[in-house]
Image (cartoon, coloured by chain):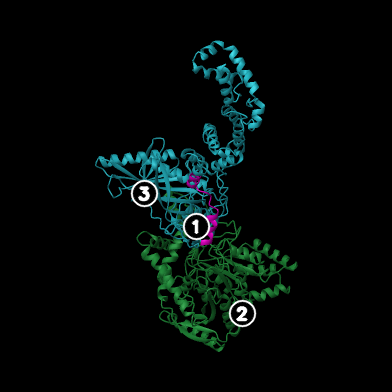
Chain colours: A green, B cyan
Amino acid sequence: MFKKTVAELSRALASKAVSSVELTQLFLDRISKYRDLNAFITVDPEKSLAQARAADARRAKGEAAALTGIPVAQKDIFCADGWLTTCGSKMLSSFIAPYDATAIARFSGAGAVLLGKTNMDEFAMGSSNETSHFGPVRNPWDPTTVPGGSSGGSAAAVAARLAPAATGTDTGGSIRQPAALTNLTGLKPSYGRVSRYGMIAFASSLDQGGPMTQSAEDAALLLGVMAGFDQRDSTSVDAPVPDFVAALDHPLKGLRIGLPKEYFGDGLSADVAKAVEAAIAEYRKLGAQTVEVSLPNSSLAIPCYYVLAPAEASSNLSRYDGVRYGFRAAEYKDLIDMYCKTRAQGFGAEVKRRIMIGTYALSAGYYDAYYLKAQRLRRLIAQDFEQAFEVCDVIMGPTSPTTAFKLGAKSDDPVSMYLSDIYTISVNLAGLPGLSIPAGFDGKGLPVGLQIIGRYFGEERLLNVAHQYQQATDWHRRLPKGFD
Amino acid sequence: MEWESVIGLEIHAQLSTRSKAFSGAATRYGAEPNTQACAVDIALPGVLPVFNEQAARMAVKFGLAIGAQINHRSVFARKNYFYPDLPKGYQISQYEIPVVAKGSLTIELDGHERLIGITRAHLEEDAGKSLHEDFHGMTGIDLNRAGTPLLEIVSEPDLRSAKEAVAYMKKLHQLVVYLGICDGNMQEGSFRCDANVSVRRKGDPKFGTRAEIKNVNSFRFVEKAIEFEIERQIDLIESGKSVVQETRLYDADKDQTRSMRSKEEAMDYRYFPDPDLPPLVVDEAFVREVQATLPELPDARRARFMSQYGLNRYDAGVLTSSREMAEYYETAVRESKGDPKIVANWIAVELSGYLNLDNKDIAESPVSAKMIAGLVQRIADNTISGKIAKEVLEAMWAGEGDADAVIAKKGLKQITDTGAIEKAIDEVIAKNTAQLEQYRAGKEALFGFFVGQVMKATRGKANPQQVNELLKKKLAG
């Protein structure tokens, strides 16, 4: 039962083959059994089982929706009323959220069960889940490697089937890269598609929440719940939410796939390149055509991102000052000392590094040279995509330049860590939807992800393209050894 | 050496919206600490601001009232600094593009009018309050005020004296209250002022180095603080020293300003556009909609009162000092159907006397406009004399009812019956034969004595005109 997708579990629940309480208990047991993965920060079986009982009661009354009774793991960046919500940081290590994020409220409204809060890089800053205050997460495909980040806990949880599905957030690749490294389908929606209310901010103009699932069909089911206008988020877009599931079955004949030459150059590992090219060949077999496109400003995406995201973060994280909630240093001389010690002790090294970069970029005398210039680059990068989409419907390439790397391999080299997101970051800068799907394995048996980038608010097409591939292949159904 | 002072004011007017600038929490003043601070106001992790459109409406209203250009697209920015009563660690403000651009305001001082430029007015949120008094060795934080919408109105350095600065501040105060966008309550901090002051030798085209005086919260203190600061700067320069650019605080107890922080210590606020908020878009339709709600402005109304009702400049000024006062007057004119100048006199002089005495606002007057109209009518129809009317007004102020009720109760109705007046005159003449003889002998000044006696005999109620006429005849014999 634990190997089933959300869509399959939904049918099992509907046919009374299993109850939500049974399902929830099953996954709680697996979480407990595989706790060495360190995928979860908080599990609260009582709370989860209470929700499961409520879901079963709702189903008994005939009021069940597709996700009613389905356990879903939530990244610990989403505030959930009454739940410890840490964002992977010592700063919030004892913060119990007094309210629900809009995404959490929508899952509750659909009858989904909150299975637990997953581990993550501190404040979503990282690509390996090693910056978490609660320790690194291990990749179920090889426990000596990282699961990617920042949504590493969600990735490991679904990859090891400790949860049938999970949520993540993606500021520069934090859903797609871990999905690629753990053989999952991970969707970063268009900016404005999913409400950010209650999702702890890293870089407000880039952050988006989205599903991390076993299949495109499951991603469609979850996105259907998460998406939609929210008046509490002024950046959410008031557009109708299409039926993502209904759109899955479109044939691919005539699909034009753009292949950016910049995504297949230096720095891409041979194994990844091979798997991605094989996946593209499969698409051609399914009736798609490919066309070379160019995203000439791609090489500027990382420097652009590492000015803008830290700039926003430096301001977003100012609220963690020890005054009202969260961690406060035990001893201090005066107000300034309280601020300094609280923030020095409460934040980890990567968070501090980014706060410093961002503060510098916004400082008088540097603002024009860094922040404003990066904003101009951001527009150029978005224009590259607009031009590319004149000749194609979706863009494909690798999600990550390599497969999962060893724990600790890049911890001391922030720049090489930042390069893990080289293919994903520009999608956030352009506000577009991007998706990573399983596309095979490297020589060591580690998963490779294929990235598919769509037009603004084109999630329907994106999920359809992914689903058609998953109908023809079974990469996404493979499980890591020891978890099957 | 002749010196000239150069002053610019930054006024923070608290907008009287029901809820906060970026959250749904109430803005009521004086609630228990932290009872009007929601998740957004205390900056919990994950919360987001949503702009209160009502505040935009008010800002645009102000912009239209000062003839300013309205920016159709203005941008919210973050002003970053750490302070315990600033929950997010930044204040949402407008920096590069404010909602209201250049406008102006005409002030009047000693009979002279001057046009004062307004550089800009922008929307921002207020911080909370730090309470240092009530907590031993600790600071209390009250976030009720955090997130309250403010309009910061920045003037050009066009003001040339402390008195002009106060005249400008009062004019602005009158305007925002008139527009209904600010309650103007200075004790509660709804209308606060920072003053930029510098001095230069008269005729020097360059400005001197300025000091900014922070947070002066009464008209009187603004005048005193600026006057002190001007003297201090002149003294410095005349003694061979120079003024340093700095922020200063006014100490009302000592009547002096003192240094708070120098330019070197000035903070770098690292302003940048707030990524949580799209630009504020104010389209033509919105502006037209706000334009339609604009009341007649004080200056226009004053001019109209002078031309339409024939009032002098002073009375017209008093009667347009607030919207309530102007409406009170016009209601009284309409209701009384009487001479607008007489109505004006009863309000601007007599009633205002009582209001000032009891330190009351026209809105709190126990005598309504209708009641004043009733009083004026009774004068016009000769029921009472102007003199008796003052007695009636006193009783009305004391809450004894309207003019008719007071007149009836106190028996103040004027005597117009010729027979009754003649009878009173006859009695007075009979009692004062000596004076009668003197009068008839040519001492005409005694006429006033007889008038007084008759009025006394009728307890002031006799119609004075009739008394005059009849008395003249009787005294002549």
Q: What element does badge 3 sit on? A: loop
Label 3 Cα crowd, 10 Å radius (few <14 / some 14-19 / many 20+): many
Q: Which mark is residue B157?
A: 3
Badge 3: chain ID: B
Q: Residue furthest front?
A: B477
Q: Nearer the viewer, mark 2 or mark 1?
A: 2
User: Disc 1 designates what residue?
Assistant: A91
Q: CA distance from mark 2 to mark 3?
A: 65 Å
At which x and y percent is residue B148?
Answer: 52, 50
Badge 2: chain ID: A
Q: Main SS type for the magenta part?
A: helix
Q: Is residue A418 visible?
A: no
Return the disc, 2 or 1, that comes first in the chain's sequence. Answer: 1
Question: Where the N terminus of chain A falls, by quadrant?
Answer: bottom right
Residue B302 painted magenta:
yes
Q: Nearer the viewer, residue B399 or A266?
A: B399
Amino acid at dot 2? Leu
Q: Which residues are magenta?
A: B284-304
Amino acid at dot 3? Pro
Q: Residue at x 56, y 40 (%)?
A: B329
Q: Residue at x 62, y 78 (%)?
A: A247
Q: CA distance from mark 2 to mark 1?
A: 42 Å
Please determine if labels 3 and 1 lie on a single subunit: no
Q: Nearer the viewer, residue A130 or B109?
A: B109
Q: CA distance from mark 3 to mark 1?
A: 46 Å
